[in-house]
């Protein structure tokens, strides 16, 4: 069982299953306040800093890395629209970088 927590909203979603796209989790829980625009690794609106559980997330594809490089982000920043839960880690904590846009 993996818990996914979203900051700064302080929202926790329990029992996220391996293979689940986080965009589906946030669509079901809009109180998580992750903003989206393109939903296809183009705009960077949905960037999150992974505070915990990075090892449980799907690998970064080239498209996603290209966007993160434009923003000059480090390896702890991901695009929520591209992340799937890949391993059953106990907890994933994400800090939404543009929460004010949601
Ligand atoms: S919504 Fe545009 S990169 Fe995720």
Image (spheres, grey):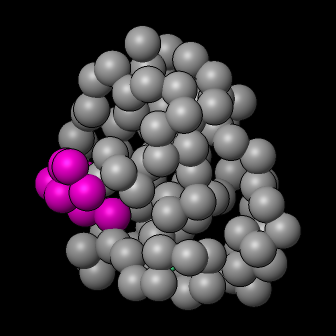
66 lies left or right of 38 = right
- Does residue 3 sit above or below 39 in this rendering? above
Of 92 and 39, which appears nearest the observer? 39
Whole-percent x, y for residue 94 in the image: 46, 46
Span colored in magenta: 27-34
Residue 85 on image: x %, y %: 55, 35
- Among the 4 quarters of the image, the one containing residue 37: bottom left
Residue shown at 69% from the left, 51% from the top: 76
**Which quadrant of the figure contains the N terminus?**
top left
Residue 22 shown left or right of residue 74 in the figure = left
Quarter of the rendering occupied by the C terminus: bottom left
What residue occupies the far left of the structure in this picture?
Answer: 31
Measuring from the top left, give residue 36's x and y in whole percent: 38, 76
Report the magenta stretch's main SS: helix
**Location of residue 89 with respect to 69 vertically, above or below:** above
Residue 29 magenta-drawn? yes
Residue 52 visible to an observer of this rendering:
no
- Percent position of residue 77, x then y: 64, 58
On whether residue 79 falls in the magenta region, the answer is no
Q: In the visual, does 61 lie left or right of 91?
A: right
- Residue nearest the viewer, comparing 99 with 34: 34
Give the residue drawn at x 40%, y 56%: 23
Q: Is residue 72 above or below residue 62?
A: below
Q: Residue furthest right?
A: 62
Is residue 62 visible to us here?
A: yes
Q: Quadrant of residue 65?
A: bottom right
């Amino acid at each position: 069982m993996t818990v996914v927590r979203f900051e700064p909203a302080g929202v926790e979603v329990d029992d996220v299953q391996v293979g689940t796209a986080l965009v589906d989790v946030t669509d079901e829980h809009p109180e998580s306040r992750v903003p989206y625009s393109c939903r296809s690794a183009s705009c960077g609106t949905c960037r999150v800093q992974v505070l915990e559980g990075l090892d449980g997330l799907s690998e970064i594809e080239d498209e996603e890395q290209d966007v993160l490089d434009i923003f000059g982000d480090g390896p702890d920043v991901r695009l929520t629209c591209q992340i799937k839960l890949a391993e059953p880690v106990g907890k994933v904590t994400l800090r939404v970088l543009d929460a004010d846009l949601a």
